[in-house]
Image (cartoon, rainbow, N blue to C red):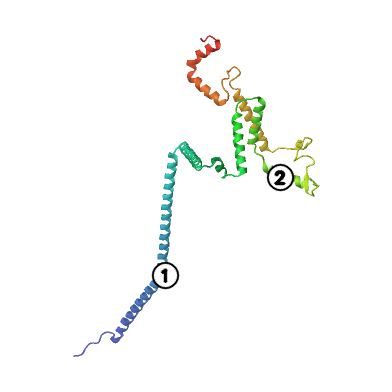
Amino acid sequence: MLKRKAPGGSTSSAPVSETRRSRLSQMETVNENDNMEQENSGPVSESAAQKAKERMERWKALQGRAKKSAEVNRKEVYAERRRQSVDPSETARLNRRRAEAEFKLAKADAEDDGEDFERKRAWDWTVEESERWDRRVEKKKKHVEDVAFQDYTQTARKIYKKQIRELKPDLETYATDKAKLVRDGTIVETEDGELIAVDRDGEFYANADSLGFVDNKPNKQAVDRLVGDLRQAEDTRMRRRKGGDEEDVTYINDKNKQFNQKLARYYNKYTGEIRDSFERGTMV
C-alpha cells in the first residue's frame, strides 16, 4: 500500500525549528537580564541597608539625648521647688546660729587648753587685713552714731559724702584727655632726669589760676546726669516740705513719720481728746 506524502514534503520542519531557536534565544536573553539585574541590585540593596542602619543609630542616639535631657530638667525642677519651699530668712537664721555655735565651741576649746582665743584667731589674718578690718568696724560705728541731726553743716557733710560715694567717674574720657595732654603738652625735664608733660593752660590739671574750664564743653550724658541729680534733690526737699508749715513735727525721719501716720489712722479717734486736753493744759 502506498503512503501519501505530506503536503510540502520536508520543507515544513524548517519554520518549527526556527521558532524553537528564537524562543530559546529569548529565554536565554531573559535569564541573562535577570542575572545582570541581580548582580546590579546587590550593591544597591547593601547601601540601602547601610543607610537604614545609620539612620536607626542616629535615631537611637537622639532618643538617648532626649531622655537624658528630660531627666536633667526633671532634677532641676525638683531642686528649684525645694529651694523655693525653703524660707531664705530661715536658712540665714540657721547659718547664723551654726556660725555662733562654731564660734562658741572654738572659744571653749581654747579656754580649756589655756590659750588666748583672740590671739589664736588673729593667726588666721595678716596685719594689713586686721588693720583694715578695725578701720571698717570703727567707720561703721561712727556712721551709726552720726545718724542723729546735729547741725546743718554736718548734714551738708553727710550729703556731700553720699554724693561722692555715688559718683561714677568717666574713666574713658579721663584716659583720652590724659593721652591728649601727653601728646600736646609741654615736655619738661625734672632734676632727676625724668621727662614729664606739663599742662600750661590748666585744661587737664586745673588749679585756682586755671581758666581752661571756660572752653570745656561737657557731653550730653554728663549734662543729663547733673539734671537728674538736681531733680532728685528737689524731689527730696519737696517730700520733706509736703506736710506744710502748719503740721506738727512729731517725727525724726521719713520712716518715723510714716509709722506715726499709721498709728494716727487707727488711734487718733481714741487719743484726740486726751491730746487736745494736754495742749490746752486742762488735763488733770
Q: Which residue is mark 2?
A: 176
Q: Is residue 177 above or below residue 162?
A: below
The residue sitting at 59% across, 36% down in the picture is: 137
Q: Amino acid at mark 1?
A: Pro
- Residue 35 point in image, percent of width and height: 37, 74
Where does label 1 land, which residue?
43
Quadrant in which residue 172 is drawn: top right
What is the C-alpha distance between the residues marked 2 and 1?
72 Å
Q: Residue 146 versus residue 172: which sits nearer the camera?
A: 146
Closer to the camera in the image, 43 or 246: 246
As helix, strand or loop, the secondary structure at mark 2 comes to helix
Identified by mark 2, the residue type is Thr
Residue 252 percent across, percent down from the top left: 58, 23
Total numbered circles? 2
Residue visible at 62% across and 40% down in the picture: 131
The spot of residue 117 in percent (x, y) is 53, 41
Dot label at residue 110: none
Query: Could you tell which of marks 2 and 1 lies nearer the N-terminus?
Result: 1
Q: Report the quarter where the N terminus lies.
A: bottom left
Give the number of the mark in front: 2 or 1.
2
Residue at x 68%, y 35% (from the top left corner) = 223
State the residue in front, 134 or 14. Answer: 134
